[in-house]
Image (cartoon, rainbow, N blue to C red):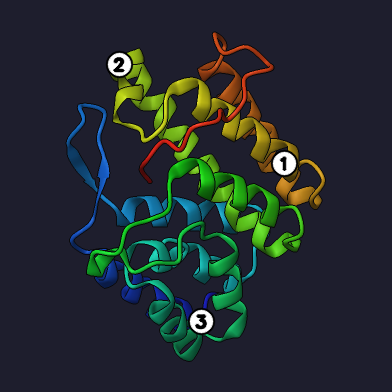
Amino acid sequence: MTLTPRFHFALSYASALHAHQWRKGPNGGHEVPYVMHLLGVCAIVLENDGSETQAIAALLHDAVEDQGGMAQATRIRDLFGADVERIVLGCTDSFVDTASGEAKLPWLQRKRAYLARLQSEPDDVALVSAADKLDNARATERDVQRRGESLWQIFSAPKARTIAYYRALIAVYRVKGPAVQRMTDELECIIERLGADVPPDATLGGDGADGG
């Protein structure tokens, strides 16, 4: 597949949009430019037969959640089309404008709602969503190897709850298309290594842990 100028514009747009955003590092600091995550997700999408539209959505998958809420979704639609906007919204679990100080709903409430919605999302959304989670899981495993179990303290939910959430996502991805399931194979292996000490019947829990 040849990527068109539309993709290169999206790459530039995403890089500028997240220019002052950093990914949580293994030492609890902000050590990695956030665009590295966006590039990682995009690469996974393209490696798994994703389209240019899906690759663009991968670059922009956190734009609504982190950089402007639904106003940003409108800009994405105007610049890149309705399908990109639809996929981005399908990968988003918070639609408020955090860049303007609006507060997200509690972690548990958002994750449960996202899991319920993801079940009915089409495969093009599931592909980008699974790529996002796979890139996150790869990074988490690398960081746990560097820092050890104390790494989990930088996350918004306790380790057992985070692992339970990923297991629930994996169950949803398992009923999606072949490309999604290929990614899910690797995602499940990583999550089970990370969560070897988390019982299979661990749940998301009943309180509303805060965070992202």
Using the image as rendered, state which of residue 36 and residue 110 is in the foreground: 110
Which element type, helix, strand or loop, lies under badge 1? helix
Q: Report which quarter residue 124 is drawn in.
A: bottom right
Identified at 58% across, 59% down, the residue is 46
Left/right placement of residue 50 relative to residue 151 reads right
Q: What type is the residue that disc 1 sits on?
A: Arg
Q: Nearer the viewer, mark 3 or mark 1?
A: 1
User: Mark 1 and mark 3 in contact (Cβ < 8 Å)?
Assistant: no
- Give the CA distance from mark 1 to mark 2: 30 Å
SS of the residue under disc 3: loop
Decide which of tag 3 and tag 2 comes sooner along the chain: 3
Q: Amino acid at mark 2?
A: Ser
State if disc 2 and disc 1 touch (CB < 8 Å).
Answer: no
Q: Amino acid at mark 3?
A: Thr
Q: Quadrant of residue 49?
A: bottom right
Q: Residue at x 62, y 79 (%)?
A: 83
Q: Which mark is residue 59?
A: none
| Label 2 crowd bin: few (<14), some (14–19), many (20+), radius 10 Å | few
Counting from the top left corner in percent of width and height, residue 60 is at 44, 67
Q: In the rendered view, tell whether residue 86 sits above or below residue 111.
A: below
Residue 45 in the image: x percent, y percent? 58, 56
Whether residue 14 is situated above or below residue 119 in the rendered picture: below
Which tag, 3 or 1, sits closer to the chain's start?
3
Q: Quadrant of the N terminus?
A: bottom right
Q: Which residue is mark 2?
A: 150
Mark 3 or 2, closer to the camera: 2
Residue 32 relative to residue 126: left or right: left
Label for residue 182? 1
- Mark nearer the viewer, 1 or 2: 2
Residue 87 image position (x, y, % from top left):
60, 69
Residue indicated by mark 3: 4
